[in-house]
Amino acid sequence: MGWVRVAAVAESGRRSWHSVGYLAHCTATMTDHVIDVEGLTHRYGTVVALSDLTLTVPPGVTGLVGANGAGKTTLLRILLGLLHPTAGQVGVLGHDVRTEPLTVRGRVGYMPEAGCLPADQTAADFVAYTAELAGLPPKEARRRSSETLYLVGLEEERFRYIGDFSTGMRQRVKLAQAIVHDPALVLLDEPASGLDPEGREQMLALIRRLGSFGIDVVVSTHVLTDIEQTCEWVVMLDGGHLVRSGPLTGFETSGTVTVEILGDAGAVVRTLQARGVPVAVDGSTLAVGPGGDDLFDAIRDAAADAGVGILRMGRGVASLEDEFLARAGDGAP
Amino acid sequence: MTDGVIYDRGYRPYDGTRRGRNGPRLAVVKDGVRRILGLRRKARRKILPWTLITIALVAAAVFIGLHFAAGSIAAGLAEGLPRYGELFDFYSRIALLFIAVTGPELLAPDRTQGVLSVYFSRPLTVDDYLAGKAVAYLAVAGSIYVVPQMALHFGLASLSDRGFLTYLADNLDVLWKVPAVAFGYLLIHGAVVGVLSAYVKRPGLAAAAFLGLLIAGGGIAAELSRSELPAARWLSLLAFDDHPRILRDWAFGIDTQTFAAEQAGFDPWVSLVVVAAVTVVGAAWIRWRYRRLA
Amino acid sequence: MTATVVADGVSKWFGLKVAVSEVSLRIGPGVTGLLGPNGAGKTTLLRVLAGLQVPSQGTVTILGRDPRRDPTVYAEVAMVPEDDAVYPDLSARRFVELAATLSQVSDPGAAAGRALDQVGLGDVADRKLGGYSKGMRQRAKVASALVADPRILILDEPLNGADPVQRSHLIGLFRHLGSTGRTVVVSSHVLAEVERMADRVVAMVDGRLAAVGTVASLREAMSDRPRLVKVGCDRPRLLAAALIGVDGVTGVRVFDGAVEVEATDAAAFARALPAVARERQVRIDLVEPEDESLESVFRYLVEARTW
């Protein structure tokens, strides 16, 4: 866990904050892949769920996206050693999942999407039990259970029965049991599912913090904006094939600069065009360029001269969704 | 004047011991025992199991008391009182009810509530899980058979006019017969309730099905075995509840009633085979079912 | 805007629990988003607006008619609830055709086909619902609501379980329906998506209305909060020092190579920025209002409910 990355993960969680520190960390620990998959294929009878998948997942928070049926659940189960792949090699935290499934599971935490909590146990009891199941001695399990429930914000409710919990509280218990045994990696399946906006924000913030705890994360979700807010690396699957595995910031950025003007944009447009800079206009929003960084100065000067304000300015960046839609085909079921 | 320290109360990694496979296995057993007895759970979960346990213990006390009373009245009177073999039936009915109401709780809720996905994400194999549940079951249900009988045994030993140790030495066979016969009941009942619990979602339904299968089903099988149907005698083997009792009679040399299988001409060792077979098949079936679920 | 659904002083309680309290609302054509914390009464309000539940107090008028007195108005309204109950043995096509028949649509087969195509299930319409993923089941339910071509469409968490492609598709569909004059009311927890789908939003907290309007207008209405703007530049300290002198700027913060500006007068700041930057010869490469999003508005609304 490089200090460089920890320093770079700022509270805002915006991806632009991550990139510099993250890339530096990457070069420092190139061989420390958290997950290493090679030629992974899995068949259920005649149905091919995963097809010749080869990818690596670096330390940090990684997003896993794909259409339904793209093979995400199959991949997660194989990573946990719950499913024997039909073919291929899978390494998790340096262990071969086929030969050492128990070792892998001892170091990995899992937060399932579906309901998976007993109604008739208290949160503290259940989480302590799952800690014991991971090998912790009973007293330590109890202690860790308390600490973890405190961490996820359930310190007051931890002695209540889970059956009485709201959705938000349940999701937190699920997360608590996933980290109680201090895993090196956690797999989260739709962690924000069913949570209201406040709850989603808190959950996403917790996920970002996991990195600072020294825990690597893989988040599988359908909500791409959540991935944009938490992840540094994205793995995209479609129909069992790997579409993309790379950093979040690696998308094609357009060469144009988008500017929103407060006031009469016309003067700015004329000034820029007089300098030979191409400008497209849409109301008070201008698309300037393509060009290099000197575009910024040109815009700044034109605005200052015209006495208008700049409400918003930035290089056009493709969103994760644009990327996904472009690569993932026409959205077959 | 020492320097002030502010401690970082954030996340602490865990660098302590991690037990190998035995830690999780033991945890499953302990959780199983707690689940059966309703410990660390809502109060209403404790009612049925503890009521039945209380009945068993009170009955044990009553029997010991009777022996004591009879012994002090007249020496030979106590001989007519039920002991060991005869008592097995009584305790086995209590145990049967106990298993019916608590057995399904061991397997069904984990499955229906989806908790299996959490358990198997730990270094816990399906075999570990099932074995742990089986041990918990045997330990608690087994106690209902063994503890009152042993209490009676040692009670009788202390009441005996031949002396405590002599009585024990003369009746050493009791010490292995009681657990062995108890095993006969435990295994066959456990196998049936286990298979039912592996499929039925509601514990109440599994309990009803279990009791129905054993009692009514057994009765029907026994009746049919006496009929003129071809190979009818073999049906007598399906009266599962009879076999442990045949083994009990065999072990203790008593003759409480004539069972359908005996009527059909089967020797007692056949019951042993049936019990073993049902246990093995049941265990394999449960295992097969859970391996597909994990 | 001609209102198509009007709620007037609507309250709804179940025993002692007040789910909706004194809500007055005018909803018109286009897409209206409904948001709020869990338990805020959104589902109850949606059901009342759809005419599926009678308010304990107050009235609901749909297309100018009271559904209690004029049940024919139900033909114009369709609701897609959140729960996941479906008939697993029906194919999507049969399910939607059934809905069409029940709504007395002429030529239910063709209508079903059109509706299924609209939601993107045309190719797999003949598979059984039980074999569908959650996202596909949701789409089938939307299709069954669309098949009667209702003027008012009310959807409770319709994107639940849908994968990114399906989500994008559905968002586009709702926007299209809204732009063709239908009234679409959608509740969702994913604010980023509500922002894309909805022209106007309605926020509920604890059963009461917390806010109504477009996101921009709501942001304006939060007048007691200063705006935050992130300015990326090549010499942050220099720019920060210059900006603090601008009228209306109440704070600057240097943060990881950028300047975060707090301004009570966002317009004045926007106008001052280019001149100040040029004067100091600072290159600005990013100007990003930090809390324009619906998330920010929502946080404000929810925080405002505590003491």
Image (tube, rainbow, N blue to C red):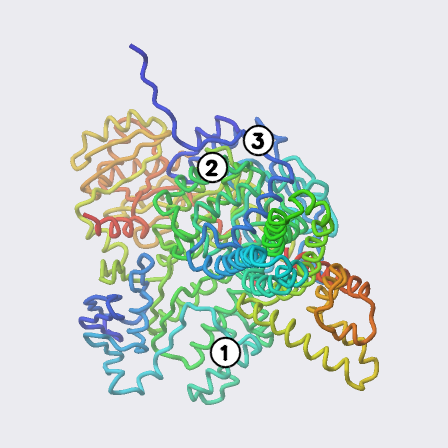
Q: Is residue B242 above or below residue C228?
A: below
| Residue at 23% across, 61% down | C212
At label 3, the amino acid type is Thr
Furthest residue toward top: B1
Q: Residues within 10 Å of mark 3 (few under 14, many from 20)?
A: few
* Subunit under mark 2: A
Q: Is residue A242 visible?
A: no
Q: Residues within 10 Å of mark 2 (few under 14, many from 20)?
A: many
User: Any mark on residue B17, and which?
Assistant: 3
Q: Residues within 10 Å of mark 1 (few under 14, many from 20)?
A: some
Q: Is residue B294 visible?
A: yes
Say if labels 3 and 2 share a chain: no
At label 2, the amino acid type is Arg
Task: In this rendered view, identify the residue nearer to me: C2 or C81.
Answer: C81
Q: Quadrant of residue A148?
A: top left
Residue beneath disc 1 = C114
* Subunit under mark 1: C
Contact, mark 3 vs mark 2 (Cβ under 8 Å)? no
Q: Position of residue B5 (x, y in %)?
A: 34, 19
Say if labels 1 and 2 share a chain: no
| Residue at 22% across, 68% down | C25
Q: Would you say A2 lies left or right of A163 here?
A: right
Q: Position of residue C74 (x, y in %)?
A: 33, 83
- 3D distance between C-alphas at marks 1 and 2: 56 Å
Name the secondary structure under disc 3.
loop
At label 1, the amino acid type is Arg
